[in-house]
Amino acid sequence: MNFKVATPDSVNKGFEVVASPLLEDARETLGKVGLSLDKTVKHFRIETNTTGSVLDILAEEVEIVPD
């Protein structure tokens, strides 16, 4: 719970997940409906400091830009 208090968070780690079950599942699921993910799509993971949140991103590239 955040009790309606918004505080900034920062990135602890950001990295590419090389052997990604999430990416393989996405390719399989999309394949069932006749779509495909280009092989240039990768799985990136960002972990935050304050909240310990994890963001999983499927994209060709990710750039973290400092404030």
Image (tube, rainbow, N blue to C red):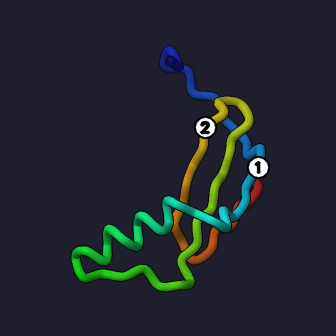
- In percent of the image, x 66 and y 51: which residue is there? 46
Residue nearest the viewer, comparing 30 with 4: 30
Q: Is residue 28 above or below residue 2?
A: below
Q: Is residue 4 above or below residue 28?
A: above
Residue nearest the viewer, comparing 28 with 55: 28
Q: Is residue 34 above or below residue 59?
A: below
Measured from the top left, where is residue 40 in percent x and y?
A: 56, 83
Circle 2 packing at 10 Å, graded few (<14), some (14-19), many (20+), is: few
**Residue 56 falls in which quadrant of the image?**
bottom right
| 35 sits to left or right of 15 | left
Q: CA distance from mark 1 to mark 2?
A: 11 Å
Q: Which residue is mark 1?
A: 13
Measured from the top left, where is residue 54 in percent x and y?
A: 60, 43
Type of amino acid at the residue the image marks with label 1: Lys
| 1 sits to left or right of 35 | right
Do callouts 1 and 2 mark residues in contact (Cβ within 8 Å)?
no
- In percent of the image, x 54 and y 71: which residue is there? 59
Q: Is residue 8 above or below residue 35?
A: above
- In percent of the image, x 47 and y 68: which residue is there? 24
| 4 sits to left or right of 27 | right
Circle 1 packing at 10 Å, graded few (<14), some (14-19), many (20+), is: few
Tell me which label, 1 or 2, sits earlier in the chain: 1
Helix, strand or loop at disc 2?
Answer: loop
Number of numbered labels in the structure image: 2
Type of amino acid at the residue the image marks with label 2: Ser
**Residue 28 falls in which quadrant of the image?**
bottom left
Measured from the top left, where is residue 67 in percent x and y?
A: 74, 52
Residue nearest the viewer, comparing 42 with 51: 42
Q: Which residue is mark 2?
A: 53
- In percent of the image, x 36 and y 82: which residue is there? 36
Q: Residue furthest top?
A: 3
Helix, strand or loop at disc 1?
Answer: strand
